[in-house]
Image (cartoon, grey):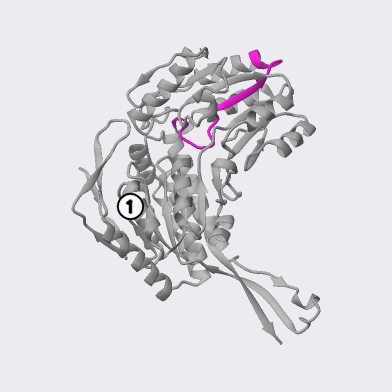
Amino acid sequence: MTDKFHLYIGGEQVSTKEYLPVFNKYTGAKIAEISKAEKNHIDDAVTLAEKTFKQNKLTAFERYKILLKASALVEQRREVLESSLIREVGKTRKDARGELDRTINTLRISGEEAKRIAGEMIPLQASEGSENRLGFTIRVPKGVIGAITPFNYPLLLSTHKIAPAIAAGNTVVVKPATTTPIATFLLVEILEEAGLPKGHINIVTGAGSEVGEWLLDDQRIKMYTFTGSGEVGLHIKERSGMRPVALELGNNSPNIIHHDADIDLAAKLTAERSFHNAGQACISVQRLYIHEEVFSDFKEKYLSYVNQLNVGNPEDPNTDIGPMISEKEAARAEQWAKEAISEGAVELTPIKREGSLLYPIVLTEVKHEMKVVCQEIFAPVVTLIPYKTMEEVLDNSNDTDYGLQAGIFTNNLNVAIQAMKTLEFGGVIVNDVSTYRNDVMPYGGVKNSGLGKEGPRYTIEEMTDERMIVFNI
């Protein structure tokens, strides 16, 4: 049976002339069809979102209760949601469980933050001539938020946009990725069952080149939040004009293994996190810089862990690496690796691909200008690069257009502090991998890795305006 998902506008399902297929990423079977929106549907969705924002506001405590209940409902429906992620994304059962854990937490945290939105007192009376002035700020919701979500974490990253928007008092028009839209529909269904009135969230589906452009055309949308490629992020920024944007874009994460590190720990953690979600995470381990004194020891231990990873059917609970999002993307990553080998890189694991299944690829003797080093590969491909000095490795780590997160393993506090101060990234993770993310923390990059921060408290700040209030008393 194939599920059919219509547009969801103002609490009503809206049929369209055309529908797009959604496939099981492992078997290739069609599992669903989604509506292909036309421009009038986008107009309708924004109109109803704006009307809801103006006429059906929720109190902070109501928003808190809704999000907390939604968190509990997600927990109750773990099996259904996990199975959906396994089918539509190709996630392993292990990775799907992790995404569910984080989704539950993000909904709960967003609910708690809904009760904490506040301004501050401003000491106007400290200035001569303002002795009788009382000043303070309040934070007010922006209005309609346009949210565009990616394929790799469709449930979690939809939650990171929708839940803070609701917590802040906004309404949302969301466009999920056409390859993995089901999770967003299930999330909205849960939110409305938890008590969210109809119209607060509207779902439009279709190609980003059309639906995304129509969303950008609509001046009633007060802010855009997007996770995806740098090229699309730049386009959104250029098209949004004076309206704010939050952009979570790419990375090619460096992870440094210094000579004084716990090599066993470093090898285990980097091997485990290099290939989760088939390497399709913007903070996945990609560049591993290892001090030359421990390079051989680390390489041996790292490869030992990598060779224990199971590749195959994501339904199998023992599988560590499932399929990539498409055979096209797997073939691209395979070609990048073969291109690097033709230019002098050495493969430490055999290059093997079965359709969209790409087995772990570990390369060494690479050059900076190779795509596998200087670009974001977004695949289960890792490079091992020796270094001599901290100055050298910090310079090489920073020699990128990206700046989302980096990792460093060291037991020397001075080395850690030097890395913290020098690495040009939005986050520096010490004695863990660049992939570490806790959903309460301010998550976001510098350079071409984006603008703004995610993490409910910080997203709420992005999605509200600070308003100055002055009393003449």
Residue type highlighted by circle 1: Val
The image quadrant where one finds the C terminus is: bottom right
Q: Quadrant of residue 221?
A: bottom left
- In this orientation, does residue 190 appear? no
- In this orientation, does residue 244 appear? yes
**Residue 329 is inside the magenta segment:** no
On screen, residue 249 above or below 45? above
Is 24 on the left-hand or right-hand side of 415?
Answer: left
Q: Quadrant of residue 132?
A: bottom right
* x and y percentages locating residue 427 in the rendered image: 63, 41
Is 470 on the left-hand or right-hand side of 46?
Answer: right
Circle 1 Cα neighbour tier, 10 Å, few/some/many (<14 / 14–19 / ≥20): many
* x and y percentages locating residue 39 in the rendered image: 28, 58
Observer-nearest residue: 270 or 247? 247
- Magenta segment range? 278-296
Residue, disc 1: 211
**Residue 283 is inside the magenta segment:** yes
* x and y percentages locating residue 392 in the rendered image: 70, 24
Identify which residue is drawn at 78% across, 82% down: 131
Observer-nearest residue: 83 or 375? 375
Q: Which residue is farthest left? A: 17
Identify which residue is drawn at 22% across, 48% down: 19
Q: Which residue is farthest bottom? A: 473
